[in-house]
């Protein structure tokens, strides 16, 4: 036969457990598609999708569960978080590496000088390619179909190969020039944005 102290201990434990469970219970609040507010322990599936509020036993909101996002909304939210993280890292970089606007301008000018050197080399190579094509074009003019002379021969394979190679080199140099010019413009824009942001971060409104 179970002793009375043990029975009392078990009964007390059950009561305390029940009270604790009741204290931990929460109520969910949601609004249906018609704008009606509902309360309960188990909201319907549409409420899970539309979002709901968790209330404690006193009816005080303790947690807000947002509605489920569509794939497009989720992608937009992710992109926003990534942009915010990128901006935060960039702000930290600016404040840690520069003490004044002149420092950023100096870094900008150094980078632009590097790009300008690469751009000038590419432009020189492009001019050389154009000059080579002029020479080859003059040579080609003595052969068919560029020459109307009856004795003109067809373009030799070697000469045709040189022209094809020169055309490829010119196209490559044109692309290189365009790439450096785009890099130059992007670099200017980036540093302009960095300078503007640095001023925002380091300028504090004065109290009047």
Image: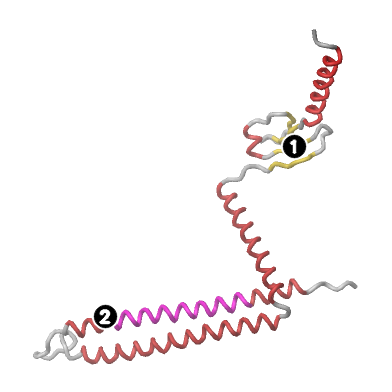
Q: Main secondary structure of the magenta part?
A: helix
Q: Look at mark 2 in the image and give the residue it sits on.
A: 164
Percent position of residue 66, x then y? 68, 43
Image check: 136 left or right of 102? left
Measure how far apart labels 1 and 2 are at the Cα level: 73 Å
Looking at the figure, which quarter contains the N terminus? top right
Q: How many marks?
A: 2
Write the residue at 78% across / 40% down: 62
Q: Quadrant of residue 164?
A: bottom left
Please name the residue that numbered disc 1 is placed on: 54
Mark with earlier residue (1, 2):
1
Where is 37 relative to 198, above or below? Answer: above
Q: Which residues are magenta?
A: 165-191
Q: Is residue 187 magenta?
A: yes
**Residue 139's x, y, as percent?**
22, 91
Q: Is residue 175 above or below residue 140?
A: above
Q: Secondary structure at mark 1?
A: strand
């Amino acid at each position: 036969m179970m002793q009375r102290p043990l029975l009392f201990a078990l009964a007390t434990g059950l009561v305390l457990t029940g009270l604790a469970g009741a204290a931990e219970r929460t109520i969910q609040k949601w609004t249906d598609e018609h704008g009606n507010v509902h309360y309960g322990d188990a909201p319907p599936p549409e409420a899970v999708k539309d979002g709901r509020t968790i209330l404690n036993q006193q009816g005080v909101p303790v947690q807000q569960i947002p509605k489920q996002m569509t794939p497009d909304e989720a992608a937009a939210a992710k992109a926003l978080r990534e942009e915010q993280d990128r901006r935060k890292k960039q702000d930290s970089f600016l404040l840690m590496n520069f003490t004044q606007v002149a420092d950023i301008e100096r870094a900008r000018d150094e980078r632009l000088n590097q790009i300008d050197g690469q751009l000038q080399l590419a432009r020189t190579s492009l001019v050389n390619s154009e000059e080579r094509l002029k020479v080859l074009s003059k040579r080609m003019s003595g052969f068919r179909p560029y020459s109307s002379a009856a004795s003109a021969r067809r373009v030799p394979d070697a000469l045709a190969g040189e022209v094809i190679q020169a055309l490829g080199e010119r196209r490559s140099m044109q692309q290189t020039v365009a790439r450096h010019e785009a890099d130059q413009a992007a670099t200017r824009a980036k540093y302009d944005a960095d300078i503007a942001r640095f001023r925002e971060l380091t300028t504090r409104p004065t109290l009047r």
